Image (tube, rainbow, N blue to C red):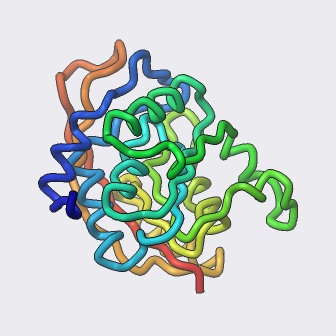
Amino acid sequence: MGTPSKGELAKMLSGLRGFATPKERLEQYPTDGDTAALLLHHAQSHGDLPGSVADLGCGTGILGIGALLLGASHILFVDIDDAALAIARDNLARAGLREEKATFLKTDLLAIKQQPAVHESPMTSLKADCAIMNPPFGSRHKGADIAFAQLGLRVAPVIWSIHPGQTRAMLEAKSARWGARLTHCISHSMHIPSMYDHHRRASKPVAVIIARMQRN
């Protein structure tokens, strides 16, 4: 099978399993196939996907699986939730991908982020050539998406991450403090389905940015 186009990838990823019982406290929202394909094709076009990739806060695994379909050599799927990791593992099989190309790791990324960079023991298995993520936006844990981005830059020299649309200036300032830079910022509308009791509409478009950050 050749490398899928962006449209083909979006269709393939849209057919994967979603969350069976999403947990609002973990801000579990699915990444739709179009958004995942857009992020991944930009990452591929910048040469960021041929090596090892860490999917941080992987959820159902859609980003990591898409990266494998575009040629990544190995994916590290990381999440705090056992149920999410089980779905990601099942989706890997559904996509026809070999499990030896993947590692599944349960860990609390926000807890690791609080530890100093010199503390290596939780970080030894968290290394990759590129990190990709659709992090929690911070409705339950303020600043969670920024914390994920900072951790991502400890894991890999390049990250691709999804953030609320109004955070570009913050990401530019924060990345500079972290010894990195925001190299690309793509505006996008991501559709969030109705999943929780307080949701009143079947689907809601949310303005986001897809950001590429790189260590200096």
Q: Is residue 171 above or below residue 109?
A: below
Q: Residue at x 58, y 54 (%)?
A: 148
Outermost residue on the top side: it is 197
- Image position of 36 (left or right of 101): left
Outermost residue on the bottom side: it is 216
- Residue 15, horizontal then vertical, whole percent: 22, 34
Residue 172 visible in the snapshot? yes
- Image position of 147 (left or right of 37): right
- Image position of 53 (left or right of 35): right
- Residue 154, horizontal then vertical, whole percent: 67, 66
Residue 128 quadrant: bottom right
Front in this rendered view, residue 25 or 127: 127
Q: Residue at x 25, y 51 (%)?
A: 35
Count the marks: how many? 0
- Residue 85, horizontal then vertical, whole percent: 53, 32
Q: Residue at x 58, y 80 (%)?
A: 215
Q: Residue at x 62, y 34 (%)?
A: 80
- Residue 178, horizontal then vertical, whole percent: 65, 74
Residue 194 quadrant: top left
Residue 201 quadrant: top left
Classify the position of the C terminus by image quarter. bottom right
Residue 145 visible in the snapshot? no
Front in this rendered view, residue 73 or 120: 73
Classify the position of the N terminus by image quarter. bottom left
